[in-house]
Image (cartoon, rainbow, N blue to C red):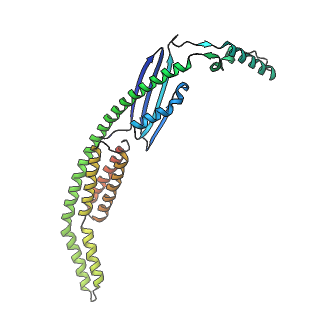
Amino acid sequence: MIKSMTGFAKCEASKNGINLSLEIKSLNSKNLDINCRIPRSISHNELEIRTLIRKKLDRGAVLVNVYVDYDEGGSGVEIDWAQAERVHASLGEVRKKLKIKEAVKLDHILVFSQNILKKDKLEDSKIEWELTLDCLNSALASLDTMRKQEGQNLYRDIAKRIKNFHEHIKEIERLGYQRIPQAQEKYKEKIAQMFANDEIDESRLQTEIVLMADKLDISEECTRLASHVQLFTQDTKSNSSSGRKLNFILQEMHREINTIGSKANNTQISHMIVTLKEEVERLREQVQNIE
């Protein structure tokens, strides 16, 4: 089952007056690129967040946003008056030293609020991390569901294009067999012209025959192309389907299509080759969205 790399999920949770909201967004990327925006109070847990995401996701540009809010009176805040006085005194010394006329104001002191405000930071930090962990697991599950749903939409479009691929390959094989008699007549005329000359280059004659046989036969390329298409189909149905592998198979398909186009000197086949190339490009665009 294929999964899309795009998705979004959000989870909210509360405990002891602490409200936490977590959002996770995933976009297309060649590799797994994780960017976390989390409060400073749980920044030491970022490695755990990244590890958990890596266990769930293989590819994608992943952005995790965590917002924390406290109910009014939900988390007791106290002022460290001794520290506040030291901050005020230090600012006063700076004012005198630099000969600043402006008096020290509350706004100036609040710049150092992290030094003068006290609360049970350790306990709050534990609760914040618990809420973050619960929300992250829930959001990742929702994200996975969404990516699977998007993957199913991709699969339906891919399956439709693959069906067209099989039909075109069969038609190319049919046209390839049809053109053999015409090509044989053409080469017979060319060989007859060579025999009309007084001198016959046996080496040249053998080379022309080998080239004729090689140019007439596109069955091997059609067989390989059909095999690549079948492998592509099987991989889209596999539980371990990989966008990287699918992209590699598409490269092989494109190579065989080019070979058929260069060997099949036929207008109808050439038109179908152009169509197949367009289909490969459309499939490539879809595969870019697959994890």
Question: Residue 59 versus residue 117: which sits nearer the camera?
Answer: 117
Q: Is residue 193 left or right of residue 21?
A: left
Q: Examine the rendered structure and indicate whether residue 73 appears above or below residue 123.
A: above
Q: Examine the rendered structure and indicate whether residue 211 appears above or below residue 252.
A: below
Question: Residue 218 versus residue 83: which sits nearer the camera?
Answer: 83
Image quadrant where one finds the N terminus? top left
Image quadrant where one finds the C terminus? top left
Which residue in the rendered view is the most extreme toward the top?
Answer: 73
Q: Is residue 226 left or right of residue 54?
A: left
Q: Is residue 238 left or right of residue 90?
A: left
User: Residue sitting at 27 percent across and 69 percent down?
Assistant: 215
User: Residue sitting at 43 percent across and 32 percent down?
Assistant: 25
Q: Is residue 268 visible?
A: no
Q: Examine the rendered structure and indicate whether residue 174 appears above or below residue 17.
A: below
Q: Is residue 154 visible?
A: yes
x, y percent for residue 8 = 40, 30
